[in-house]
Amino acid sequence: MKLFVPGMTAILVVVAALASSDASAVVTQGRTYVFYNGTQVIGQSLMYCNNAEKHWGEASQHNLANAVSVSYSCSDGFAIHVGYPANIDPWVKTNFCSQTQSCDTGPWPVAGAPALENLLWSD
């Protein structure tokens, strides 16, 4: 004997949709961190709008005092904020956008970056 309750299918579909959306939050910004040793770029971490995380070189979560951060809008890809740590070399602040080409759209690896690896950090 089958029991049919009108509207039960719709309730199950809504509950299933709510349960599956918990795990994947809507991402509104991508981000990149470009790591420096003085005035030399030594690594980069990238978080794309699809939640993919990549890095190259020395991209340490424990070295953010030497990393310039750039946030990008996921709707159009344009940079919305560039953050410089307090003690970064003044040359980096002056030349970051032209040297890395990271201040327009992104997040993308800086020009000339080696092959990307999975995960956000190298450590």
Image: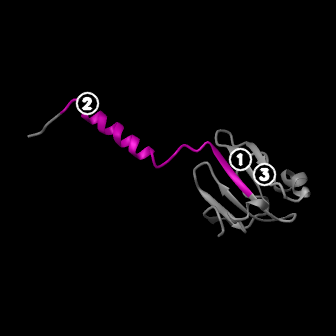
Using the rendered view, name the quadrant where residue 118 is placed.
bottom right
Q: Quadrant of the C terminus?
A: bottom right
Q: Which disc number belongs to residue 7?
A: 2
Q: Are marks 2 and 1 in contact (CB under 8 Å)?
A: no
Which amino acid type corresponds to the residue marked 3 in the rendered image?
Ser
Element under disc 2 = loop
Q: Residue furthest left?
A: 1
Q: Is residue 50 magenta?
A: no
| Cα distance in 3D space between marks 1 and 3 | 10 Å
- The spot of residue 28 in percent (x, y) is 61, 42
Q: Earlier in the sequence, mark 2 or mark 1?
A: 2
- The spot of residue 102 in percent (x, y) is 78, 51
Q: Is residue 9 magenta?
A: yes
Q: Is residue 87 above or below residue 82?
A: below
Element under disc 3 = loop
Q: Which of labels 1 and 3 is toward the front? A: 1
Tell me where the magenta segment starts and ends, as one range.
5-33
Q: Which residue is mark 3?
A: 102
Q: Which residue is mark 1?
A: 71
